[in-house]
Amino acid sequence: MYTVTKNTKLISLALMLIGVVALGYGFIQGAGHHTDEEIAHQVETIAHDLHLDAAYHTEAHDSHAVEAHGVHDHAVEAHYAPLFHKLEEVFHLHFSAEEMLEAHDVEHVIHTTTHALHAKAQRPWSSLLVAAIFFLGVSLVSIFFLALQYVAEVGWTVVLKRVLMAIGSFLPYVGAVLFVIFITGGLHLFGNHTYHWMAIGIMDPESANYDAIIAGKEAYLNFGFFMLRAVIYLAGWYFGLKKLISLSLQEDEHGGLEYYNKSVKVAAIFIVFFAVTSSMMAWDWIMSIDTHWFSTLFGWYVFAGMMVTVFVVLSMVVVHLKSKGQLEHVNENHMHDVAKFMFAFSIFWTYLWFSQFMLIWYANIPEEVTYYNARFDEYSVPFMTAVVLNFVVPILMLISRDAKRVSGFVITIGSIILIGHYLDFFVMIMPGTVGGHWHLGFVEIGTFLGLGGLFISVVTKKLASMELTPKNHPMLEESKNFHI
Amino acid sequence: MSKKVIYGVYDDDDVILQAVKDIRAKGIHVDEVYSPFPIHGLDHALGLKPSRLAIASFIYGCIGLSLGLLMMWYMMIQDWPQIIGGKPNFSLLQNLPAFVPIAFELTVFFAAHLMVITYLMRCKLYPGSSETSPDPRTTDDKFLMEIEAHGNEADLIALMKETGAQEIKEEQIA
């Protein structure tokens, strides 16, 4: 039996502590958020003090000289800069040159400031969502991969099944984190503006906030139905995992084919359920952030990314367990096949990434390209880095057989791929939630590490609670003698 | 120069795999094994070097990728530029997303076809080549091991019998 060592416990505890501190720091930074009226009032007061109210407004509209010089005249650009600088001091913000340039009146300055302050309050929530989606992928898709082993009656993975079960056991924890995000978002608490369609008045034709396109999606995107779906997804997935674990443990005790055959049935139903819910989960929890935009293959694209992370994390856990003298039947042949999956799904991820991009790039329809405009303009570095880390690195590093058979090398490359997929989720979520005011700093990385610490703690505890090699699995011998 | 070879005919893949291992463990070189289907682990048991087909395939893929891009550049940028969907037609780089599927297909096409052709050539399976298997039953249900004898025929025959050979033949090859 595997026991969780003190070091592992300390590391996971330290990581969780970092996570709590990072989140706390994020909330304190974003706290003291003011209502929109307060912000407007404060901006107007400062503008008045600086004699920037109204004066320029009339001048800009009356003077033909300004038009003759074009809108981007330097005098025009500089006009509201002092106001912006003062606001940066007062609210601890940072405005880009473009934002300052775009402001044509005090009204616009108020709008920009409100956005920046909302982004600041939103920052810890977005960081939490990125980290949660990342670990949701790891645990959820490892349950899917486990179910797949039963349905396809795979032999070689038998000695890895318990590890997959342990990784899948993180699902309820990450589910709880997601629920915190959903509920605070739906109730507009603590500055959570993750889902734009949850905003007050957005579906109300009388409101100033009304958005006809979003209102048209009300039948699907309303808080009640959204929460109901989330409950159904998570309950279904968790039920599948519980059932597979308990059947496998009963098989250890009693033996016989009965439990295996039952597992195949459970797994088959799970896969059908997963096929629908994995896509819907991606639409609900990620795609609905950019509420106007949609992409048909988005669910598979998200799934492909999650699948890659499963194989990386699986290799890492196996290497850890082997270093503790566990999993004596797992050898480089098993690891080779896991690395093959890692390689193959990296290519599959790129295929879907590119398919989504190329169609939108070619068709050039305004409501579709805005999605990529935001990513190329404001997120070009993480956006492009993700493609390099998720495609170029695995294709060059993992293509050869010899490379795939050395676990140390595979998990080194795997760590790079994990960073790539974190960035991938980052550029899916951030542009629609914090826009141009994004950071990749202590709050984001700390939150990720914190959830990672919780992951390590839960998974190692689960690993220590059961025999790591199933006893009476009908294909156990095949797996022990696996050779490629 | 003529040489003398011993053929041992086996009727089970596991038996011949074990036989190869046992005979090689005695320091005797097994020249060839003929089998109706690939036997897992036989390459390793025979002490064959890993195949270099993968390296060749990688190079073929690179050739396909370069040719694909070169073709698209010549057709769509250099020789007859056309405006399609308002996309820039004067730069390969800016038009790259449109060319990726073609370049990808040609990469796969070159890698796959040239790899198969290389494999067939290396196995001497080109048109007009003659059969090399000493016994046609190895295309049906028999497995045959070939060992070159250097005056130790009796030992080899005994060894093959011991490891489960069903028939043994001696043959002089010109």
Image (tube, coloured by chain):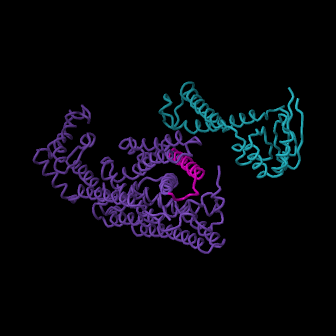
Q: Quadrant of residue A145?
A: bottom right
A51 in the magenta segment: no
Determine whether, in the image, residue A43 is placed left or right of residue A250: left
Main SS type for the magenta part?
helix
Determine whether, in the image, residue A7 is placed left or right of residue B134: left
Q: Colour of chain A?
A: purple
* Residue A265 visible to the viewer: yes
Q: A457 and A3: which one is in front?
A: A3
Q: Residue at x 52, y 32 (%)?
A: B83
Q: Residue at x 63, y 33 (%)?
A: B60
A341 in the magenta segment: yes
The percent coordinates of residue A328 (x first, y second) are 56, 57
Q: Colour of chain B?
A: cyan
The percent coordinates of residue A203 (x first, y second) are 36, 63
The percent coordinates of residue B101 (x first, y second) are 57, 39
Q: B51 and A62: which one is in front?
A: B51
Q: Quadrant of residue A215?
A: bottom left
Q: Which residues are magenta?
A: A325-354
Above or below residue B119? Residue B36 is: below
* Residue A302 visible to the viewer: no
